[in-house]
Image (cartoon, grey):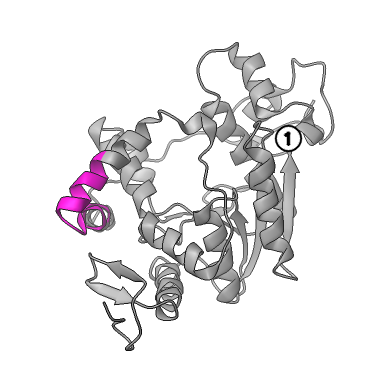
Amino acid sequence: MKCRKCDRQAVFNMRRHKLALCEEHYPEWFVAQAQRAIEKYHMFAPDDRVLVAVSGGKDSLALWDVLLKLGYQAGGLYIDLGIEGYSTPSREKVERFAAQRPGAEFVVVDLKAEYGESLPEVAKRVRRGRGKPCSVCGLIKRHAMNRVARDGDYGVLATGHNLDDEVAVLFGNVLHWQTGYIARQAPVLPADREGFARKVKPFCRLYERETAAYTLISGIDYIYDECPYAVGATSIGYKDILNRMEEESPGTKAQFYLGFLRARKAGFFCEQGDGIDLHPCTSCGQPTSAPGLCAFCRLWKTTDRQRVNGCI
């Protein structure tokens, strides 16, 4: 199969676009698609400082690479959760990526070093062995991302969520009619409260396999393994169902997601004001609805390892 733009051999074929491209023109197309999404959804401007949450996986590293190539002021944030057999190799991938790009700002939040416990340790303590630590993990990540964005004067927080991720979340929320979550799902979540950064997803229109192709063609070294706690997640099951639908009818996932965005823009899913009064946490200063300490700071309140950052 020949490249659509030249006579060279194509290395990647996108059935939904009926488009095959070579190793030179595919990365160009991919970068252009990301820029198109940034502009279409008014994610950020050239003078905005963007913090990219990087995990060591293909999507987040590809996003950081693309934003740097486009000339944006994009810094990276890696959160070391201390997950045995996973955090160390993924952190090494991110550090190697940053070292190969002189001038790229890079911040590491080491949970164990800064707060005295790893994710598995704090989750075991507060959950007493009840299930996976995913809810605790989400709380920790949100707090770390908001803190670094605030302290580093980043107005925008970017994540590498791709189309497959977005469609799986949407499918699950529609299946269970989680109307609140449906109303808040969007390529851009504005910073509607003081202390929060605007959250954006520049890859929301790109398939996971398209991102994987970009990283491979561009020579980006990433960790292939998923987080061990992700095994058995319902979102993975939803992705399998959607992949089978996509195989039968290319473009199904894009049609589902983009149709949702059009309906959302037309007002079919109106987000209601929650009326929640937010105020600064008395310890870390981040917005919280709880009196006194925020949920993150309360994680460390009962442990004898209380340390640093004023979160005790």
Quick check: 180 above or below 105? above
Relative placement, left or right, of 36 versus 103 is: left
Task: Please give the residue where the numbered disc 1 appears in the rendered image.
Answer: 111
**Quarter holding residue 305:** top right
Relative placement, left or right, of 257 versus 87 is: left
Instruction: Give yes or no for residue 165 being in the magenta stretch.
Output: no
Identified at 45% across, 52% down, the residue is 161
Identified at 51% across, 50% down, the residue is 192
Marker count (numbered): 1
Q: Give x and y (percent) for residue 197.
A: 59, 52
Relative placement, left or right, of 280 versus 159 is: right
Q: What's the residue type where badge 1 is placed?
A: Leu
**Quarter holding residue 111:** top right
Identified at 53% across, 62% down, the residue is 63
Quick check: 76 above or below 127? below
Q: Give x and y (percent) for residue 256.
A: 22, 52
Q: Nearer the viewer, residue 153 or 20?
A: 20
**Residues shaded magenta:** 241-257
Identified at 36% across, 36% down, the residue is 235
Q: Residues within 10 Å of mark 1 (few under 14, many from 20)?
A: some
Q: Give x and y (percent) for residue 246.
A: 21, 52
Quick check: 129 above or below 101? above
**Quarter holding residue 67:** bottom right
In the current view of this chain or complex, which residue is farthest to the bottom? 7
Relative placement, left or right, of 92 versus 67 is: right
Q: Nearer the viewer, residue 167 or 311?
A: 167
In the current view of this chain or complex, which residue is farthest to the right? 308
Residue 98 at least partly seen: yes
